[in-house]
Every structure is written in structure tokens, then in C-alpha cells.
Image (cartoon, rainbow, N blue to C red):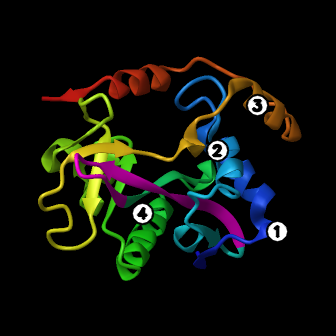
């Protein structure tokens, strides 16, 4: 495979949305919202364009990663951090190492650009290989004070989070309205919404708390 990672261009927009929709469809719940989130991110003030990339296989886009501004809210104020998501690979290329290449490349670029830390939400077994650990290891909780097992943190340089504790604050770009998603989805070919076992697994994972 001839693999290339580059920044997204306007001509790529629809293709990237298609892949996002296919990658997440019925994964976490019936249907998907991630393609609409990508659409919103592109014009949002929290979008970090310099860290957002597409990955090509033989000159065809097969995945992408998007970064936004986030923060750790402490008693003294906000400590700037960054977050990625959605990150996705075309289903036909799952388990071929493309996601790992894309995430690893973006992390290295974030380090070069001097960012402090990455916060994300997800399954720990997906991200431990990059050095992510549960927020409880860094005294970083959700805004309700609970240490959600799926809140994952990666310092980008030595002692980056020393003396810092608080809660994670993510961009409001991830907040979506179901009716807006339904309307946006009409620009794509119809897909069937289904209830699948993986959705129950996701629901249970979202409820796991580290003590």
C-alpha cells in the first residue's frame, strides 16, 4: 500500500464525511453523529487545523483525525490542552494499521508544536499503546468530579502535568442536536439503523468509574 498522511483540503470534505459515517454507523448507538460533528468542527473556533489530517491509501482517502482545543480546569484557572476525535478509518481497512499510523503521526506533530497534553474519551485498550492513561493517574476528572475510566490523558513532554489537577473541559462542538443530525444525514444515501451488541458494550464502558 502507498500510504500518505496530509492535511484535509476542501475537495476532500464529502469523502471524509462518508468515511466517518460508515465507520461509526450503528457502532455506539443506532445510526451515527460523528460525520455531523466533523462537519461542525471544520468551522468551529476550537478546531486545530494544523493537527488534523487525512490518510490516503493509493491516492484515495481512507481515514481522518480531527483535533480541537480543550482544557484542564483547575482552582487557579484553565490549563490549555488539546483533544482528538473523531478519528476513523474506512471499514474496509480496519485492523490494517492505518489508525495507528494516523494517531502516532498526529501525536508527534503535537509534540513538535509544543502542546502540553492530549485529553480524549475512549476505550483504554485502544490508546494505551500511545502512552495514554486514565485521568485518575493525573488527578484529572470529569466536571462532576468522577474519574471516568474512559477519560484518557497523554502528557506531551516530561512533567507536563506536574502540580496540575482539576477536571477536563471539552469543546462544545461535540454537542449535537438529534434533529440537526437527521436533517444533515439526508445528503447521504439511506442506511438502516440497527440495535447491535456493541452498543451495549459502549453504554457499559461509559459508566465505568475509576476509584
Q: Residue at x 70, y 57 (%)?
A: 43
Q: Earlier in the sequence, mark 2 or mark 3?
A: 2
Q: Earlier in the sequence, mark 4 or mark 2?
A: 2
Label 2, secondary structure: give it: helix
In front: 38, or 28? 38
Give the image quarter of residue 112: bottom left
CB-based contact (under 8 Å), mark 2 and mark 3: no
Q: What residue does disc 2 label?
A: 37
Tag nearer the camera, 4 or 2: 2
CB-based contact (under 8 Å), mark 1 and mark 4: no
Label 3 crowd bin: few (<14), some (14–19), many (20+), radius 10 Å: few
CB-based contact (under 8 Å), mark 4 and mark 2: no
Q: Is residue 83 above or below residue 115?
A: above
In front: 13, or 117? 117
Q: What residue does disc 3 label?
A: 180
Q: Is residue 77 magenta?
A: yes
Q: What residue does disc 1 label?
A: 11
Amino acid at each position: 500500500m502507498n500510504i500518505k498522511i496530509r492535511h484535509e483540503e476542501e475537495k476532500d470534505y464529502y469523502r471524509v464525511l462518508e468515511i466517518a459515517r460508515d465507520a461509526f454507523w450503528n457502532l455506539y448507538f443506532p445510526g451515527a453523529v460523528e460525520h455531523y460533528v466533523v462537519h461542525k468542527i471544520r468551522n468551529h473556533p476550537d478546531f486545530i487545523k494544523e493537527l488534523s489530517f487525512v490518510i490516503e491509501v493509493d491516492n484515495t482517502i481512507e481515514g481522518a483525525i480531527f483535533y480541537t482545543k480543550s482544557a484542564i480546569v483547575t482552582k487557579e484557572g484553565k490549563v490549555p490542552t488539546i483533544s482528538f476525535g473523531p478519528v476513523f478509518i474506512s471499514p474496509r481497512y480496519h485492523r490494517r494499521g492505518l489508525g495507528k499510523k494516523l494517531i502516532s503521526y498526529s501525536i508527534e506533530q503535537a509534540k513538535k508544536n509544543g502542546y502540553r497534553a492530549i485529553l480524549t474519551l475512549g476505550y483504554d485498550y485502544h490508546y494505551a499503546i500511545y502512552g495514554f492513561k486514565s485521568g485518575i493517574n493525573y488527578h484529572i476528572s470529569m466536571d462532576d468530579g468522577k474519574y471516568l475510566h474512559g477519560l484518557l490523558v497523554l502528557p506531551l513532554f516530561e512533567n507536563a502535568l506536574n502540580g496540575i489537577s482539576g477536571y477536563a473541559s471539552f469543546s462544545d462542538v461535540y454537542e449535537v442536536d438529534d434533529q440537526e443530525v437527521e436533517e444533515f444525514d439526508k445528503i447521504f444515501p439511506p442506511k438502516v439503523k440497527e440495535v447491535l451488541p456493541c452498543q451495549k458494550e459502549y453504554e457499559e464502558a461509559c459508566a465505568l468509574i475509576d476509584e
